[in-house]
Amino acid sequence: MIPSCHYSNQNGRRPSDWERVLARHWRANIFRAVFDRKRLQPGKLNGRKDVDSFGHTVSAIGHDCSTLGGNSGSALVAVDDLRVVGLHFCGVTHESNYAVPTWELLSDPAFAGQQLNFV
């Protein structure tokens, strides 16, 4: 898989001192403190999990791609056939990042009648 993804370590609250130290470390060492660039971050899928998001339970795809805040909606792309398999939406520190499977979007009323192809 090759996504450019989002990860938020705040989870709706102020980060702890330790989380701020880790965030500085990740930005400096993983991303080399270079921002304002488009990125492809390699990773692997790690199964399905029901994840709470804004009062809804989402049957999500887990993935382990390195991420930064602000990239929700980024695509997870299967490199073998270049299909978008999910859209990144959240992460849990030291656990996993999560994406909505594209095939699950077919049942979302927001996409009804839009003539989208999720094949």
Image (cartoon, rainbow, N blue to C red):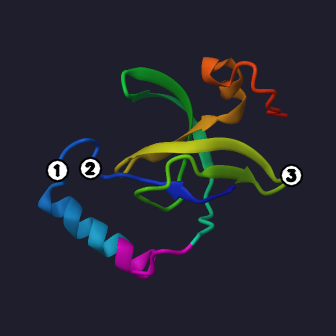
How far apart are the alpha carbons under marks 1 and 2? 6 Å
How far from the left and from the top, in percent, is residue 114?
75, 26
Query: Which range of residues does the magenta coloring cover?
Result: 27-37
Percent across and percent down for residue 6 are 47, 54
Give left or right: position of 89 versus 118: left
**Circle 3 sits on which residue?**
81
- Residue under numbered circle 2: 10
Circles 1 and 2: CB atoms closer than 8 Å: yes
Q: CA distance from mark 3 to mark 1?
A: 40 Å
Query: Magenta stretch: residue 3 in it?
Result: no
Mark 1 lies on residue:
14
The residue located at (78%, 57%) in the rendering is 79
Q: Secondary structure at mark 1?
A: loop
Taking the spot 27% from the left edge, 67% from the top edge, the residue there is 22
Check disc 1: other Cα within 10 Å, few if <14, some if 14-19, many if 20+. few
Q: Is residue 91 left or right of residue 109?
A: left
Q: Which is nearer the N-term, disc 3 or disc 1?
A: 1
What mark, if any, has residue 28 been given in the picture?
Answer: none
